[in-house]
Image (cartoon, rainbow, N blue to C red):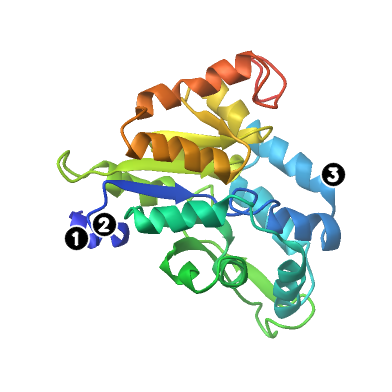
Amino acid sequence: MAASDLPAMKTNPKFIFFTDYDGTITESDSNDFMTDTIGFGYDLRRQGNMDTLEGRKTFRESFKEMMDSVKKPYNECIEYLLQNIKLDPGFNDFFKWSLENNIPVVVLSSGMEPIIKALLAKLVGPDSEKIQVVANNVRARPGKSINEEGGWELVFHDESGFGHDKSRTLRPYAQLPADQRPTMFYAGDGVSDLSAARETDLLFAKKGHDLIKFCVREDIPFTVFESWKDIHAVCKEIVEGKQSVQEAAVEGHQQFKSGEAGVNGSANGAAK
């Protein structure tokens, strides 16, 4: 695929930031929040996450079970989330800096595009339209209206076991010729980010979350972040040539071994 065919390459950027949305740009995961409070609850959701990490279920299967348990009309779900989901306090400053430095931001999400765009419009403002969103979608169930009780269902982005295999968006950028290929950043926190973790140049994994366990188990380089203030600081150093991607990418294992990554376990047992 030519660079001109890739949406984030329109301005010939030297860097692109790909990111998960729920629990990464936002302080909490909107899908987890709905499942825990108006779906089948935390315990069943957490069990589904562990089943995915340990290979008993695909992410697609566990996520569909989560969303099927939410019966509230879709328009009420959006309003419910608009009232409860907050943006990471460092994201807007990072996003402003990215616009000033020709660094496109691309959201890759297993959430639903209408919800993500509604939340971004409220939390980021008009410039949110400059963020490309690649996500799952939603539709009315047969014979129902999307805005009635039990009336909507998830529509997956692709046929993969993830439902949305994020690596498929990253890979064409990674395969560009060396003189065109941008440096690729990615930020994430959970099991839906596993497919993207291997495809990026520098992975930011959120402190205390499942993605760190996977990276340690699979020996994938990463660095830990608590908020987008951390991401902003590291990216600024790299863009200004003060730190290399390689230097930043070795820090995660060191943070894990020293107990600073916010997860328990060893490299051999990290996914348990």
Badge 2 local density, few (<14 within 10 Å), some, or many (20+)? many
- The answer to whether any part of residue 44 appears in the image is yes
Q: Position of residue 74 (x, y in %)?
A: 70, 76
Name the residue: 54% across, 18% down.
253
Q: Is residue 198 visible?
A: no
Residue 248 or 256: which is nearer the viewer?
Answer: 248
Residue at 54% in and 27% down: 215
Q: Which mark is residue 9?
A: 2
Task: Find residue 262 and report its image quarter.
Answer: top right
Q: Residue 221 location in percent, x, y?
A: 46, 25
Question: Mark 1 sits on what residue?
Answer: 4
> Disc 3 residue type?
Asp
Q: Nearer the viewer, residue 66 or 237?
A: 237
Q: Nearer the viewer, residue 239 or 155?
A: 239
At label 2, the amino acid type is Met
Q: Which residue is at the front of the view, 26 or 46?
A: 26
Cα distance between the residues tagged 2 and 1: 6 Å
Q: Which mark is residue 43?
A: 3
Mark 3 residue element: helix
Q: At numbered mark 1, what does the secondary structure look like: helix, strand or loop? A: helix
**Image point 70% across, 37% down: which residue?**
51
